[in-house]
Amino acid sequence: MTPEAEALKARTKKFALDVLAFVDTIPQVGSNRRISWQLADAATSVGANYRAVCRSRSDEEFAAMIGVVLEESDESLFWLEICIERTLGERSLLIEANELTAIFAASSNTIRARLGRSSARNLKSEI
């Protein structure tokens, strides 16, 4: 595994741990419970699924798995935006989620281009 992949594994794990620490500070009343659960689920899935990406056995498998990581990263970003708009969140997590989403979108586009697939199909999910 490359040093870059190892660094990204560590970064996604830290993101998950930081989000879990944040979720523990959210008052668990009303819809906050659902928001907390969704955010924790998505954020921990980023790191867990990225680890699976690092074990992919082919470019096709990598492309499929990095797509899952991108979806989870973008979902984390969505729930963090909800937290910010409800004055529950902190912007540093939002910035990190945005950066991770950009990294995984670039990876997805690169592998799909290498496989000769149009990344235009994925634009619908990014809009």
Image (cartoon, rainbow, N blue to C red):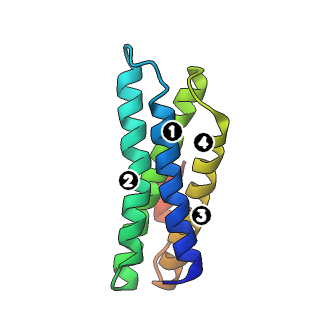
Residue 91 locus on image (x, y percent)? 66, 36
Earlier sequence position, callout 1 versus callout 4: 1
Earlier sequence position, callout 2 versus callout 4: 2
Residue 89 locus on image (x, y percent)? 58, 29
Residues at marks 3 and 2, CA–CA distance in whole angstroms: 16 Å
Earlier sequence position, callout 3 versus callout 2: 2
Q: Please name which of the two marks, 1 or 4, marks the residue nearer to the observer.
A: 4
**Closest to the observer, 83 or 14:** 14
**What secondary structure is found at the residue carrying circle 2?**
helix
Earlier sequence position, callout 2 versus callout 1: 2
What residue is disc 1 on?
Answer: 78
Q: Do the residues labelled 2 and 4 touch (CB within 8 Å)?
A: no
**Closest to the observer, 47 or 124:** 47
Classed neighbour count for the residue bearing mark 3: other residues with Cα under 10 Å, few (<14), some (14–19), many (≥20): some
**What secondary structure is found at the residue carrying circle 1?**
helix
Q: Identify residue type, mark 3.
A: Ile
Q: Is residue 102 left or right of residue 58?
A: right
Earlier sequence position, callout 3 versus callout 1: 1
What residue is disc 3 on?
Answer: 103
Residues at marks 2 and 1, CA–CA distance in whole angstroms: 14 Å
Residue 19 locus on image (x, y percent)? 49, 41
Query: In this rendering, does residue 119 appear at all?
Result: no
Classed neighbour count for the residue bearing mark 4: other residues with Cα under 10 Å, few (<14), some (14–19), many (≥20): some
Q: Are marks 2 and 1 in contact (CB under 8 Å)?
A: no
Residue 43 locus on image (x, y percent)? 44, 47
Residues at marks 1 and 4, CA–CA distance in whole angstroms: 11 Å
Residue at 63% from the left image edge and 32% from the top image edge = 90
Labelled disc at residue 93 = 4
